[in-house]
Image (cartoon, helix red, strand yellow):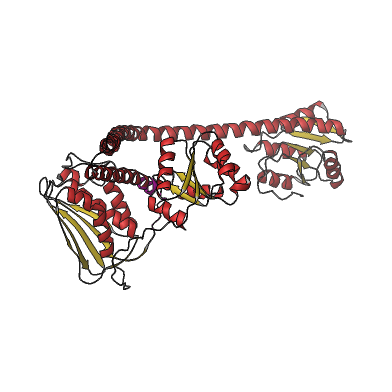
Amino acid sequence: MNIPPLPVDDTDIVRILVVDDQRSNLDAIDALLSTSGCQLVRAESADEALLALLEHEFAAIILDIKMPGIDGLELAALIKERRRIRHVPILFITASMFDERDMLRGYGAGAVDYLTKPIHSDILRSKVAVFVELFRKNLAVAKANAALQREIGERQRVQDELRHANSDLEQRVQERTEALQRADRRKDEFLASLAHELRNPLAPIRSAVEILQHGNPPEEEAARARAVIVRQLHQMTRLIDDLMDVSRITSDKLVLQVSRIELSQVVAIAVETSSPLIAERRHDLTIALPDAPVVLDADPARLAQVLSNLLSNAAQYTPPGGEIRVTAEVRGRQVVIAVRDNGLGIEPEMAARVFDLFTQGARSPVGPGGGLGIGLTLARRLVEMLGGQLELRSEGTGRGSEFSITLPVSMAPVGRSQPQTEPELELATSKRILVVDDNQDSAEMLAALLKAWGQDARVAFDGVTALESGREFHPEIVLLDLGMPHPDGYETARRLRAEPWGKDAMLVAVTGWGHVSDKQRTQQAGFEHHLVKPIVPHQLRTLIAT
């Protein structure tokens, strides 16, 4: 018997079993069917044929009748007795014509047709093609039926799972709907609070501007008006900075600048930032720090921001003339920094939610500037990023609050020093500076500030005018707003760099966008510096001086 080895996946192979005791006949049939696309399995006896039928599925059997031992008719009868293979069509081959009785016996044994030797090649191929086509159709039907049964079973399983999950899904949908409704209410409350908080600084600024605009107010009154503008501008900037910080934290884009610092320096910076509000509210501030320096590995600006936030909260939620106390205590390898007040306190039901974003609670601040409900969220996240914890303790309404920060202490020593303030830089020479901004007030006021510093400043309100002015003015520095229409700041910068006078000019981007990716984009567009609105005068002065 000559049976080819099975391939790894032979489900689509069509096989024909050829049974003949003469190898020459097997070779002849093999040659005739070489182009049929079928795999021929050869057997030289009935035993080999039965063994092959046990191992493979066949589209047809080409069976010689005259064989020694078990002849073709007897083999056909044996095949028909077996349920698995009785359906395989048998094509008898004989060297002589059968009489009617032998033909009936052959058909009774399972023959579907006869061929006489010598075999006509076209007839053999045609008959085999019919068997092959029938086999393939049966195979396709069987596969389709199996797939259908699997699909029915899978659908039944899915339906069972859906039935089991339906009640749970409905519950989850209900919970999600309620959560979205709560989030929507909190969003509306936040937007209303945002509008309120941004209008709060605008009201005194507007009044101060009115005082400065009308007549010639006494110097004391004018100085007070200017102080109001500066203070309220700082308040608006703080609100916007808090919003940007929360956005960076929630998108994991906030990067800490960690260095080795001494706690007393950070506390001094925080107190300096918060002292105007504390003084305005006439609070008594007490600070008690360890005698020995407490060294931390932290971001000094961010830690000062957290402490300043806690001090400002204490000032806002404590009636005038209250007490605020800042303490620090080293416990093992940790330091606990506490900010206590004797103010309004926090209701027990609010204590669990006070660190949630946009949460302000039922209590109202007893001073101006209620905030957006993001300060404590920001503070806790910053402390966690520094490897610490921020916790709240309050005994209830009217009994004050205590916020405590726990941070790891660095084992490396650092000398105690006082916070250093940056000296005011002298602008020894006058430089030609072109201010480009489609907001005319912004451009003109910035140019006025530059002129007050002794600089030769001009303004342009769009990119085209800026390029025309630059050809005559030849500016050494260009302060260029990015958000201008047609062309914007980026396109204006590209055109400016193409001008002979613009190749060596210092190009400074002025924008409300201050993310790292924004600064990278301006650098790629040809800007040397990136200033975020509102421009800090000291930064601009330093840039011009250096």
Q: Position of residue 469 (x, y in %)?
A: 55, 40
Q: In the picture shown, does residue 389 fall above or below 244?
A: below
In this view of the protein, can residue 342 be seen by the observer? yes
Q: Residue furthest top?
A: 100
Q: In the picture shown, does residue 4 fall above or below 184?
A: below
The question of residue 247 being in magenta is answered with yes
The residue at the point 54 percent across, 39 percent down is 466
Q: In the picture shown, does residue 139 fall above or below 291?
A: above
Residue 188 vs residue 155, the one in the foreground: 188
Q: Residue furthest right?
A: 118
Highlighted range, magenta: 245-256
Tally the numbered discs: 0
The residue at the point 44 percent across, 48 percent down is 531
Residue 92 vs residue 478, the one in the foreground: 478
In this view of the protein, can residue 111 be seen by the observer? no
Q: Position of residue 16 (x, y in %)?
A: 75, 39
Q: Position of residue 516 (x, y in %)?
A: 46, 50
The question of residue 159 being in magenta is answered with no
Relative to 24, 432 lies left or right: left
Q: Position of residue 81 (x, y in %)?
A: 65, 37
Relative to 510, 129 lies left or right: right
Residue 455 vs residue 489, the one in the foreground: 455
